[in-house]
Amino acid sequence: MKRPPLQRRTLALIAVLVPLLVLLAYVALRSGPLAPVAVTETRVESRAIRPALFGIGTVETRYTYRIGPTFPGRLARLDVHVGDHVVAGQVLGEMDPVDLDDRIRAQEAALRRADAALLEAQARQSYAAAQEARYAQLFAARSTSEEILATKRQELRIADAALAAAREERTRVGADRDALVSQRANLKLVAPGDGLVTLREADPGTTIVAGEAVVEVIDPASLWINVRFDQVSASGLAAGLPARIVLRSRSNESLEGRVLRIEPTADAVTEEMLAKVVFAGVPAPLPPLGELAEVTIDLSALPAAPVIPNAAVQRQGKQVGVWQIRNGRPEFVPVKLGRSGLDGDVQVIDGLVEGARIIVYSEKALGPRSRIRIVERIAGTSR
């Protein structure tokens, strides 16, 4: 009995569709949306870690001398340039005195006149005192009148007043002269200490106002780094801790240093703590001010405890935990974390035990019903 043509076509269509459906199901279960998620795993280890802090800072100097005149004027000369080393007391330059030298000479002449007037007043006072004493003796011997003695005493008082005025005038003129000499000395730009010239703000002939800096000198021995550390991980940071410094221009060289102090004021905007880190020795050559530096502070080692990679930590809602492998299925386990190290490991205070299997990386987000497939490495990850 022959089958109808329609039935034969149906059977042929079924024969084609069934393998296709099987193939699609296989593909969906192996590489499609229903396929197992590739994950990497690790086991919880119990060991000690040495926490460390990492921060970025800039090279600065503790002592900066901005040298300039105390009086306005024109810069006459400047003998140093950027990069020159100077010593304490060295004259770096000088302001134009204009008429200051003439005024000093005039005051010196006035001082000589004041000295002469003082000598004259002293002589008049000595003469008046001698006359008053002589007429006092004559009056005692009744050889002169009381009126003449009173006149001599009046002359002595006038001489005393004239001597006092001459002395005050001498003091005033001397003070004016000393002020001009001091002003003349302040026209010299003198280095207050040993250092390095970092800025030259003006050239000879420039008019400078009082207090304006002409040259800037830093103390190379006072270099330090202003470092910022995240407040969340800054527990244990204290003065005196050793530090490793890597300057941006010397990425292959690590310099020794230490924490000098912790700043009492933190940055409320960036939520960072500020610290000053000094070099163990003056680096050679000196790094430029403002250069970025990476600073690592090693803290005291912690007791042994369960440790997991920081990459395994996930957040589900308000809970922090890890995906633990149980019976071949992922299960989210909340954990309480402790301190972490710069190598990417973090201590687990509660939630996991040593030897537990946890997921480190996964191809995509996991869920409690996800099917997983353990692999050695996932592309795009470090493990």
Image: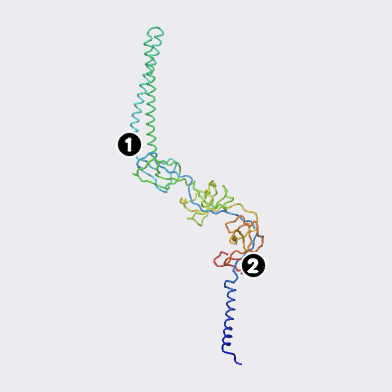
Disc 1 crowd, CA 10 A, few/some/many (<14, 14-19, 20+) = few
Which residue extends farthest bottom? 1
| 102 displayed left or right of 10 | left
What residue is disc 2 on? Answer: 329
What residue is disc 1 on? Answer: 99
Q: Is residue 59 above or below residue 182?
A: below
Residue drawn at point x = 57 percent, y = 81 percent = 17
As rendered, which of 77 and 302 lies closer to the eye? 302
| 312 displayed left or right of 247 | right
Task: Indicate the position of residue 61 as horizontal and vertical percent values.
Answer: 48, 47
Task: Indicate the position of residue 351 as horizontal and vertical percent values.
Answer: 65, 59
Q: Is residue 47 above or below residue 222?
A: below
Find residue 131 and report its image quarter.
Answer: top left
Residue drawn at point x = 57 percent, y = 71 percent = 33
Find residue 325 and report its image quarter.
Answer: bottom right
Give the amino acid at mark 2.
Arg
Point out the tag, 2 or 1, that comes first from the N-terminus.
1
Task: Indicate the position of residue 175 as horizontal and vertical percent values.
Answer: 39, 30
Tag on residue 71?
Answer: none
Q: Is residue 131 above or below residue 313?
A: above
Task: Identify the element where label 1 is drawn.
Answer: loop
Split into 4 quadrants, where in the image is the N terminus?
bottom right
Split into 4 quadrants, where in the image is the C terminus?
bottom right
Give the amino acid at mark 1.
Asp
Task: Identify the element where label 2 is drawn.
Answer: strand
As rendered, which of 125 and 71 lies closer to the eye? 71
Closer mark to the observer between disc 2 and disc 1: 2
